[in-house]
Image (cartoon, grey):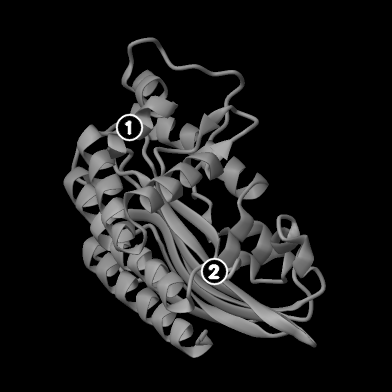
Amino acid sequence: MNDNEAVKRWLTGLQERIVARLEEADGGRFLADGWDRPGGGGGLSRVIEDGGLFERGGVNFSHVMGDSMPASATAHRPELAGRAFEAMGVSLVLHPRNPYCPTVHMNVRYFNATAAGREPVWWFGGGMDLTPYYPFDEDVEHFHAVCREAVLPFGGEDEYRRLADWCDRYFFLKHRNEPRGVGGLFFDDLGADGARPFDDAFGLTCSVGEAFLEAYLPIVERCRDLPFGERERDFQAYRRGRYVEFNLVFDRGTLFGLQSGGRTESILMSLPPIVKWRYDWTPEAGSPEAALYEKYLRPAAQRLRD
């Protein structure tokens, strides 16, 4: 049986645990900014800017409800149009200052859609993905290995492959014909078809959320003190533009938040503070910047998770 309160307790606890560990790593403090949503619900945004490690980062909890599902939530589930909804989740994005430290995203969420005289429909979604600028094989392999271990107890290798492949397809900039980063995990509508019990779907979601720190912190701890200059910062700002494009054009969470009347400042905290765009730019052949495109931003790079 679904238990909304148990989900909320875990989500708020997850936010607290992640923020505490990130503050240890950064040396700074995350601002705590509570907010209420007109129409029902609210949340707590935890944000850091100009920290010792993170140029910008946010770990947000939201719990919102309304009388009608937003269009972003019913685009692939039209049968839910017009239903009342309750949605809660933790979403984070971290943009380190050092270009050798990758940007990372993680999200875990729960929806419950109801209508008079009809059975409630609930589901979980979430995942995490890594977006490096100057990648290292060992970091990409570590991230994928932790993702794999989080999923294996809830469906084995086949389920891990399904969620990893889903991530590759989801975090893809169609207008650029390139992936946003090097992948990870993505899932949605988990439990909506009735084939997976609530406890199992919740368990998988918890496993993914709790694995985040193990997946990401060892990477930034290894790379945070690598020397860099203006060239690396310039390329980082250019590649951050791809992150902005994806979040504003394709990301379901961003669209849902804006369409459901969520808090704009909290929703857009995922955007990096310094970004650049250039017209028809390509990296110099044989350069470290070219290696990102040639080795990592292509399907073959996903084999690093094996």
Judge whether residue 38 can be spotted in this image: no
Image-quadrant location for residue 262? bottom right
The foreground one among 104 and 3 is 3
Spatial CA distance of label 1 from label 2 is 29 Å
Judge the density around disc 1: few (<14), some (14-19), many (≥20) Cα neighbours within 10 Å. Answer: few
Image-quadrant location for residue 286? top left
Which SS class for mark 1? helix
Judge the density around disc 2: few (<14), some (14-19), many (≥20) Cα neighbours within 10 Å. Answer: some
Instruction: Judge depth for marks 1 and 2 and give the one in front.
Output: 2
Where 268 sits versus 280, above or below?
below
Residue at 60 percent of width and 51 percent of height? 251
Left/right placement of residue 216 relative to residue 175 reads: left
Judge whether residue 243 can be spotted in this image: yes
Where 260 sits versus 52, above or below?
below
Residue 191 numbered tag: 2
Left/right placement of residue 54 relative to residue 244 reads: left
* Residue 240 horizontal/vertical position (percent): 49, 39
Residue at 60 percent of width and 60 percent of height? 253
Image-quadrant location for residue 150? bottom left
* Residue 34 horizontal/vertical position (percent): 53, 82
Left/right placement of residue 105 relative to residue 111 reads: left
Residue 303 numbered tag: 1
The foreground one among 103 and 106 is 106
Q: Amino acid at mark 1?
A: Arg
Residue at 29 percent of width and 63 percent of height? 153
Residue 295 numbered tag: none
